[in-house]
Amino acid sequence: MTVFTVFGGHGKVALLFTKVARESKHVVYNVIRNASHKEDVEEWGGRPKILSLEEASTDEIAGLLKETQTDTVVFSAGAGGKGGPERTKAVDYEGAVKVYDAMKLAGLRRLIMVSAIDNRDMSQPPPIHYTTADRKMSEEIHKALPTYYHYKFLADQELIRRTEDIDWTILRPSFLTDHPSSGLIALGNISIKQPISRETVARAILGFASNAESQHLVIDMTEGDVPITTAILAFLGRRESSYDYPL
């Protein structure tokens, strides 16, 4: 049994993750800022904890992680475009950094970061496996969501810099749908055009969180044609990362 603490605990992916994790007999604490969401979390099998990433101190977050005896942190928080650029910065970047700092204070190492496909430095050439259609889509999504991608990239870069302190896995799903999971996925150096079900993402989070071989890998994911567990094992056998970084 693993004790998970999920930041952004009322999001759709977070609630679906809560459900699949509870089905596997794990414990999930869902960190939410709005007390009115407590019943929703409980209906999905989670244990709500009220805390605002924007307002909480690092010490308060560390205290929560110690209190819950967390084994693994899942960061799925985001401003969702609400509140303008300053709130995106406060949640997607500064909130993430607070959690990194709090994990060190609490003596925790394992973190699953739910990021976004194509989260990269746009001043650099695109990945070599991108098709012409992928490159066009990359330009379009970064033009449409510049603030979001800016702060998500900073958060991921800061996490990578903390490799000595945090056993992280960065998961980068493509465009999210509410369709039921097909149970099939594509991982690694893939086209970014295919969407992915939120439920598939939730199941992949649990699969990667349960396998220490996924530490320090950046993993792109879309809906695909390989069963999730099979795809994860094959991907980890390749030790492929969707983003090159210096260790």
Image: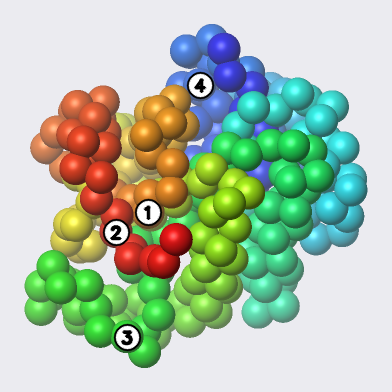
Left or right? Give the position of 155 relative to 197: right
- Image position, residue 231 (x, y; %): 20, 34
Q: Earlier in the sequence, mark 3 or mark 2?
A: 3
Q: Does the residue at mark 3 contact the one at mark 4 (Cβ under 8 Å)?
A: no
Label 1 belongs to which residue?
A: 218
Q: Which of marks 4 and 2 is nearer the N terminus?
A: 4
Which residue bears the numbered disc 4?
21
Q: Compute the Cα span from label 4 to label 1.
A: 22 Å
Q: How far apart are marks 4 and 2 (CA)?
A: 25 Å
Q: Earlier in the sequence, mark 4 or mark 1?
A: 4
Disc 1, SS = strand
C-alpha span from label 1 to label 2: 5 Å
Instruction: Check disc 4 and report its element: helix, strand or loop.
Output: helix
Q: Looking at the image, which residue is at 48% across and 81% down?
A: 146
Classify 10 Å Cα crowding around label 2: few (below 14), some (14-19), many (20 and above): many
Which comes before the other along the chain, label 3 or label 1? 3
- Label 1 near label 4: C-beta < 8 Å? no
Residue at the disc numbered 2: 242
The disc labelled 4 sits on which kind of residue?
Ala
